[in-house]
Image (cartoon, rainbow, N blue to C red):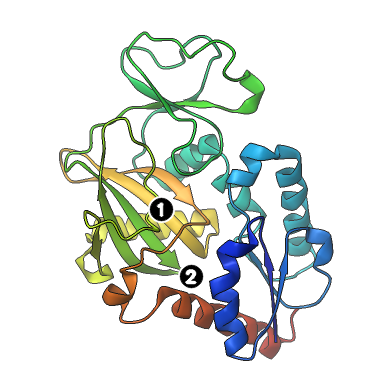
Amino acid sequence: MSILILTDIPEWVRPLVDILESKGIKVQIADDPQEIVANGLIVNRVSSLLAARDKARADRITHSLRTWEAEGRSVINGSFCFQTGYSKLAQAKLFIECGVRSPQTCLAVPGGRAIHGQAVLLKPPAGGFGRGIVALKDGEPAPDGLFSREEGWIEQEMLTAADGCVHRIEVLGPDILYEARSPIQADEFNYCLAHPESDVTLLPPHEIAPKVTEAVKKILRAARMELGAVEYLLDENDNPVFIDLNPVSSFHPKATAILGCDPLDATASYLIHRSAGLKNKGQR
């Protein structure tokens, strides 16, 4: 049994690798698709940050993922998931296709505006930790020289969360692990939940509204995402408005108390189960 992990930031996956290896699993970590030649389950853990730094390399990784899929190899968070994860415009399109609510989103206009009559968030096509996001008032143009049209920056309708929180649903396979609610801070767009801030509230799956659970599972199927998170805001009628899809998210340190087990242990068990399924079916 072999698990092959593709990542641009090896230290991010080391805790997971340690658990897998402690269970007798052979694991290979690679930052270049050409290094992956052995048979086994391929797990894509390449962050959207890579696309922001090196779009050409991200495109090469997408090509490799697509090639493996065409060859019949089993890939977790494959080419479609990866491309959607690093394109805010693609995410908005996916939310619309799923029939879930999402803010109005348009391709941004360098030095101008695509959405008129309201405030917007100007966002780079890919990123993380809220990097590069700029709030623009009604009528305020995008800064000159910040980006070109070809880069894929977006304007997104600026919403007011009815409860003042951003909600993140963490998933594993077809299942929801937990929800994390984080208060929105003025002029702050970084909602990474890898740190044990006291103002983050965690909820187990049975306390999440059924309409949210149903929508999230629809998004997972459409995005072909097995690992990651989906983020949303609540409108004045307590309906979810989805704003982000993150195939490489971070577990909150307090998640163990909600789950009754370490979420990394749960992830390792899931990957082992998926890998064993390949072996039983005689697949690569």
Give the crowd class for mark 1: few <14, some 14-19, many >=20 residues within 10 Å.
many
Q: Identify which residue is drawn at 41% across, 64% down.
A: 251
Residue at mark 1: 230
Tell me residue 72's x, y (percent): 76, 69
Residue contact between numbered discs 1 and 2, judged by CB atoms under 8 Å: no
Query: If you read the primary sequence from the N terminus, does the residue marked by circle 1 or circle 2 appear first?
Result: 2
* Rendering quarter of residue 158: top left
Quadrant occupied by the C terminus: bottom right
User: Does residue 60 sit above or below 171 in this rendering?
Assistant: above
* Rendering quarter of residue 160: top left
Is residue 247 or residue 117 the one in the foreground? 247
* Rendering quarter of residue 125: top right
Residue at mark 2: 173
For residue 91, side relative to residue 256 (left or right): right
* Count of marks, rendered view: 2
Report the disc number at residue 252.
none
Quadrant occupied by the N terminus: bottom right
Q: Amino acid at mark 1?
A: Val
Element carrying mark 1 = strand
Q: Identify which residue is drawn at 72% across, 50% down.
A: 62
User: Does residue 21 sit above or below 124 in this rendering?
Assistant: below
Q: Amino acid at mark 2?
A: Gly
Element carrying mark 2 = loop
Tell me residue 209's x, y (percent): 22, 59
For residue 121, side relative to residue 237 (left or right): right
For residue 104, side relative to residue 42 (left or right): left
Q: Identify which residue is drawn at 39% across, 28% down.
A: 104
Tell me residue 270's x, y (percent): 51, 79
User: Does residue 250 sit above or below 49 in this rendering?
Assistant: below
Q: Identify which residue is drawn at 48% across, 25% down.
A: 106
Q: CA distance from mark 1 to mark 2?
A: 13 Å
